Amino acid sequence: MSFFFVGLRPMNWSAAHIHIVTEFVLLGFPGCWEIQIFLFLFFLLVYVLTLLGNGTIICAVRWDPRLHTPMYFLLGNFAFLEIWYASSTVPNMLVNILSKTKAISFSGCFLQFYFFFSLGTTECLFLAVMAYDRYLAICHPLHYPTIMTGKLCRILVSLCWLTGFLGYPIPIFFISQLPFCRSNIIDHFLCDMDPLMALSCAPAPITEFVFYTQSSFVLFFTIMYILRSYILLLRTVFQVPSAAGRRKAFSTCGSHLAVVSLFYGTVMVMYVSPTYGIPSLMQKILTLVYSVMTPLFNPLIYSLRNKDMKLALRNILFRRKISQNS
């Protein structure tokens, strides 16, 4: 177990003999070598399927003219985001599983921390924008084409990415400047806020307050906006006289609602409820659900519940078979 203290550089201070962390150890998931190999193969399969599923959605939106609408433009960009969100954790986790030291460099840890939270924030904003799109399409169908133009879609997508990535550099920079001298062991498979702050030997209440306030604001603002949109949407749907019209309206927003429930359900448990009462293994599983499994399930949810997407995927596969046979 001596590798747990790899990366600790001694530094003599007048008050005490303190160790400065130069790299961290991500414990990941415990288990014997056979279990580690199983986990490696499982997460590798999940990652490959995530890339294939979301990549297929991007190709379908790109190549099928019937999907050149605001809803599918947002869906294609969301699939692109999901690829990067999974890539912020899974590749390093795969390397970590096979590593004997399980070490990650100091800069690598904070880069992962930055991308993980920036992409997660971007996902929250994307889900809110997609809720706004569904609200306009169902509650204001006559004005929808003139409001939700291609230009507005591009502006909204750009704002999601910019807001997500410009919100965290300063607080994460200040967190990286804290002295990490207690240990370098992180009982997680990624670099997250709570484990990092637990290793700091200097209190940083202002930095913690700014970080958690910013994260909580994004989380609650987006979920409240999504809930408000769906309350207004459902009120409009129940006023539709025909059952067929109600089914069509539900089918267009059911996929988005399933993704929102899966993502926000686990995120709220992790970051809203007190984590000190949750075992570390359960925290890892919850983080896995919203950061690794959700990007895997999203293509299945959107393709299985959406007739237009199923038809576009069928046409793409059929076109490939024809080109291969010819």
Image: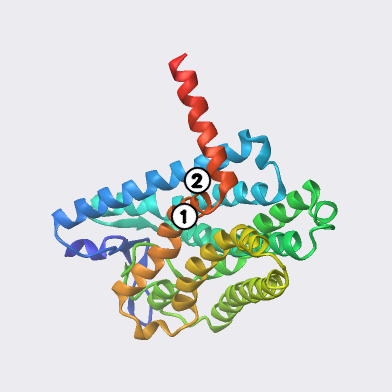
Relative to 46, residue 233 above or below: below
Give how far apart the Cα atoms at labels 1 and 2 are. 8 Å
SS type, badge 1: helix
Name the one closer to the observer, 91 or 252. Answer: 252
Q: Which mark is residue 54?
A: 2
Left/right placement of residue 277 relative to residue 163 reads left
Q: In percent of the image, x 56 and y 51: which residue is there? A: 306
Instruction: State whether residue 62 appears in this view.
Output: yes
Q: Which label's residue is closer to the chain start, 1 or 2? A: 2
Give the SS element for disc 2. helix
Q: Quadrant of residue 210?
A: bottom right
Q: At 24% across and 56% down in the image, what residue appears?
A: 101
Contact? badges 1 and 2 (CB < 8 Å): yes
* Residue 102 percent across, percent down from the top left: 27, 57
Apparent side of residue 105 relative to residue 176 in the rendered image (left or right): left
Residue ID at (57%, 45%) = 309
Task: Please tell me which residue is depicted at 25% across the width and 55% down the height of the picture.
Answer: 39
Residue 60 or 326: which is nearer the viewer?
A: 326
* Residue 221, x across and y down, in percent: 66, 75
Residue 118 visible in the shown view: no
The residue labelled by disc 1 is 295
Q: Give the crowd class for mark 1: few <14, some 14-19, many >=20 residues within 10 Å.
A: many
Compared to residue 34, the image places residue 27 above or below, namely: below
Please name the amino acid that badge 1 sits on.
Answer: Pro
Instruction: Give the residue furthest to the top.
Output: 326
Please provide percent x and percent y for residue 11.
35, 69
